[in-house]
Image (cartoon, grey):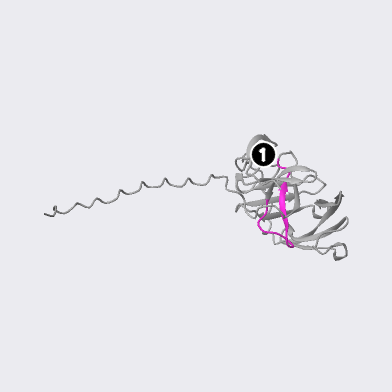
Amino acid sequence: MLATMCKVRRILGQSAGQSALYGSVMLAVLSSGCGERLRHTDTPAAPPEAPLAKINVTLDAAKLDANHKYTQNGQFTVSGLFYKETESVDATVLVGVKDEAGKISHSYDFDYAGVAGTAAKVEMWDGGFLTVVVPNGGAEPAFGTSNPNIKAVGVAFPSGESTCYFAKGTVDGDLRLALCALETQKPVLRFVDGAGIPASPPSGEAPPEAPAAAPAAPEPVIPEGPAKK
């Protein structure tokens, strides 16, 4: 897993909101150096704010191996994430299992059809909040962040590298919710296997230099007494 701080190269799309953005999010192509930058411009009317997420997942025990990972394609249910007003609406996550030369990898993709008309608010690992709004009618979900400068990292997936902004904490052992594909115009909400993902965002700050050692004090000079006769 590649985990480096990200530096803005290019701004894509449009943003919406102030403390939390609604509508399309302005996102950047990222590399090492600093957190992603979001600019707040338009301010349309915001939908009701969702309760803070407290995510629980229900897995299909018949498809799990000894390490609690799926052995075949399947799905699981996520509760406590998406809300219609104050009522939690269960979401379905589609699990894809890929075996390449004996190396198993998993993908976790949300099925948004069942959560149309809902919103989510997730505490993120840099102390900010990610807002997700799923419109009715099959429109693409919209994402927003309370921090104008988020802390994202590069992640190496089997399908290639991506840049992700992670939620605080893990779910069911090591699954971590993240907003990924920040280098594209269509970011995606997904779960990521936690192995190799840092528990907290890197600061991006160089460690302070150690202070120079003080010069050694000279040896004291002891005057000799009067010469003996």
From the top left corner, tell me how far across and down residue 18 is, in percent. 60, 45
Residue 167 shown in magenta: yes
From the top left corner, tell me how far across and down residue 88 is, in percent. 75, 61
Task: Read off the magenta span.
Answer: 166-182
Left or right: 155, with 146 as reference point: right
Tell me where residue 94 sits by quadrant: bottom right
Number of residue marks: 1
From the viewer's side, name the closer residue of 216 and 130. 216
| Image height of 83 relative to 148, above or below | below
Three-letter code, disc 1:
Leu
At x 69%, y 56%, the residue is 50
Q: Which residue is mark 1?
A: 30
From the viewer's side, name the closer residue of 209 and 42. 209
Residue 189 shown in magenta: no
Left or right: 84, with 43 as reference point: right
At x 66%, y 42%, the residue is 16
Left or right: 194, with 159 as reference point: left
